[in-house]
Image (cartoon, grey):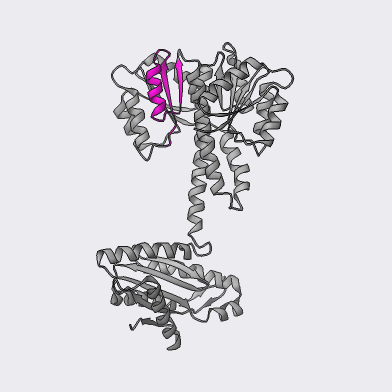
């Protein structure tokens, strides 16, 4: 994959070595020889991942990491800190500074490429979702507030699949104080738990005595419910081939035995933090898509949704040889209501209208706000005669009960309804809506508060 990686190290030989390894995997590499130079680069150039040495003269790696993570523009930039082999305390300090991952010297090639690829992929996904939501006026405020809150607390629920009791007990003692840990020894029961319960992380041993942990990883990645669940595998140092297979099938990370508790804690924390961030963006994206097709005042679908959904319903009706009908509903004398009682009262009436539409139409029907005080109700597999009956029910629900516009006042409201049906393969959706509009005009002309069907 293509990504821009910034390598930061004061020793030229280390820089050249990492640069050569990353270039061999077709990454674009930028280099910096000091913390100050690194900060200037991330502020001026797009970067996807930072490889940051801990021990540097002047500004060390912890200080650089903290400054990158504290700036809103670069807070989500992934940082991998490179530490000495015997400095486990650096990992804890790096976590406090905001590091996303760790590599130890001498840097293993598989570990290097795996960590960089995973973080670059995550950054690309995050950037894409944030770009899609960039038009939302509220998103920048939500991003700075809610995301910071999500990543500040990373206690999560973890499922550990391990059949060695002593290993499982040690991991419980290491992770239990911060996280809720469930332990399973069999793949089938683990899969059942994943299907029924919600977890933030799956830890899987690849050294199970009676089962293949890779099979569980494959099943987790193939199911919609667990597709985005982070997976960390526990692997023997000699099992390089199995590790590569795990990474190919989408495992997020790994820890090599013998397990270092600081490294395990760091990787668990990192994966849970990433999941919270991606879940947040995914939820906001779904909300933004929903908002794009929803009328903000009434909660009904809007005109954009109407046009797309009507096309789908029309094609389905013609393919199946079934009828398709529409109701065009318009509030009578709505301008007079606004002029007399104010626009707030008008908005209250429109919201109540939407509620009455929901109560008096079927589950298969779709009510949309066309604009102003005009609404469309789409009715698949509905003849003109049946549509007229539904239209009468809707009209009666509006006229029979007064609308409360404030604490002390209720007013009578009526609506006129035009009904039309798709007439076959020779007909079109444009003519269908035009005939419904003509029927609505006839209802208005005949005195309002009535249902008129297209006479064509």
Q: Which residues lie in the magenta part?
A: 228-256
Number of callouts in the render? Answer: 0
| Residue 51 in which image quadrant | top right
Q: Tell me residue 390's x, y (percent).
A: 34, 74
**Viewer-proximal residue, 241 or 97?**
241
Q: Residue at x 53, y 38 (%)?
A: 124
**Viewer-proximal residue, 422 or 225?**
422
Residue at the far right in the pictured view: 58
Q: Residue at x 73, y 26 (%)?
A: 36
Residue 404 in the image: above or below residue 439: above
Residue at the far top in the pictured view: 86
Q: Residue at x 42, y 62 (%)?
A: 308
Q: Tell me residue 423's x, y (percent).
A: 30, 75
Q: Tell me residue 189's x, y (percent).
A: 31, 29
Q: Tell me residue 75's x, y (percent).
A: 63, 35
Q: Is residue 5 magenta?
A: no
Which of the image's four quarters has the C terminus? Answer: bottom left
Residue 224 in the image: above or below residue 177: below
- Can residue 384 be seen here? The reply is yes
- Can residue 160 be seen here? The reply is no
Residue 16 in the image: above or below residue 455: above
Residue at the far bottom in the pictured view: 446
| Residue 52 in which image quadrant | top right
Q: Residue at x 48, y 70 (%)?
A: 370
Residue 225 in the image: above or below residue 414: above
């Amino acid at each position: 994959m293509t990504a821009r990686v910034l390598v930061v190290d004061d020793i030229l030989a280390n820089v050249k070595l990492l640069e050569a390894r990353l270039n061999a995997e077709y990454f674009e590499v930028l280099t910096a020889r000091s913390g100050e130079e690194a900060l200037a680069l991330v502020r001026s150039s797009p970067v996807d991942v930072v490889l940051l040495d801990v021990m540097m003269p002047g500004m060390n790696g912890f200080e650089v990491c903290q400054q990158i993570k504290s700036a809103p523009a670069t807070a989500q930039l992934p940082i991998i800190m490179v530490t000495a082999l015997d400095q486990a305390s650096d990992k804890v300090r790096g976590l406090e500074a905001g590091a996303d991952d760790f590599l130890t010297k001498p840097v293993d090639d598989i570990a290097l490429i795996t960590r960089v690829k995973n973080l670059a992929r995550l950054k690309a996904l995050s950037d894409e979702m944030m770009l899609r939501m960039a038009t939302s006026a509220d998103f920048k405020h939500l991003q700075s507030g809610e995301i910071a809150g999500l990543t500040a607390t990373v206690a999560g629920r973890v499922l550990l699949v391990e059949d060695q009791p002593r290993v499982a007990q040690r991991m419980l003692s290491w992770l239990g104080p911060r996280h809720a840990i469930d332990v399973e020894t069999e793949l089938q029961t683990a899969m059942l738990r994943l299907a029924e319960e919600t977890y933030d992380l799956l830890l899987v041993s690849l050294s199970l005595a009676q089962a293949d942990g890779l099979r569980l990883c494959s099943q987790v990645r193939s199911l919609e419910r667990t597709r985005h669940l982070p997976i960390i595998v526990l692997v023997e140092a000699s099992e390089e081939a199995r590790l590569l297979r795990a990474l190919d099938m989408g495992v997020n990370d790994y820890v090599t035995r013998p397990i270092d508790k600081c490294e395990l804690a760091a990787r668990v924390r990192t994966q849970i933090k990433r999941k919270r961030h991606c879940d947040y963006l995914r939820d906001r994206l779904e909300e933004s898509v929903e908002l794009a097709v929803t009328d903000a005042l009434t909660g009904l679908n809007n005109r954009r949704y109407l046009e797309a959904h009507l096309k789908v319903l029309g094609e389905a009706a013609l393919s199946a040889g079934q009828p398709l009908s529409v109701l065009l509903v318009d509030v009578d004398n709505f301008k007079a209501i606004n002029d007399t009682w104010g626009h707030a009262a008008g908005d209250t009436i429109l919201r109540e209208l939407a509620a009455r539409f929901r109560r008096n139409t079927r589950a298969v029907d779709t009510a949309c706000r066309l604009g102003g005080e005009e609404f469309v109700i789409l009715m698949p597999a509905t003849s003109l005669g049946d549509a007229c009956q539904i239209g009468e029910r809707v009209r009666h629900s509006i006229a029979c009960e007064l609308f409360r516009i404030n604490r002390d006042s209720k007013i009578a409201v009526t609506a006129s309804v035009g009904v039309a049906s798709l007439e076959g393969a020779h007909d079109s959706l444009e003519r269908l809506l035009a005939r419904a509009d003509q029927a609505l005009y006839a209802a208005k002309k005949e005195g309002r508060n009535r249902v008129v069907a297209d006479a064509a």
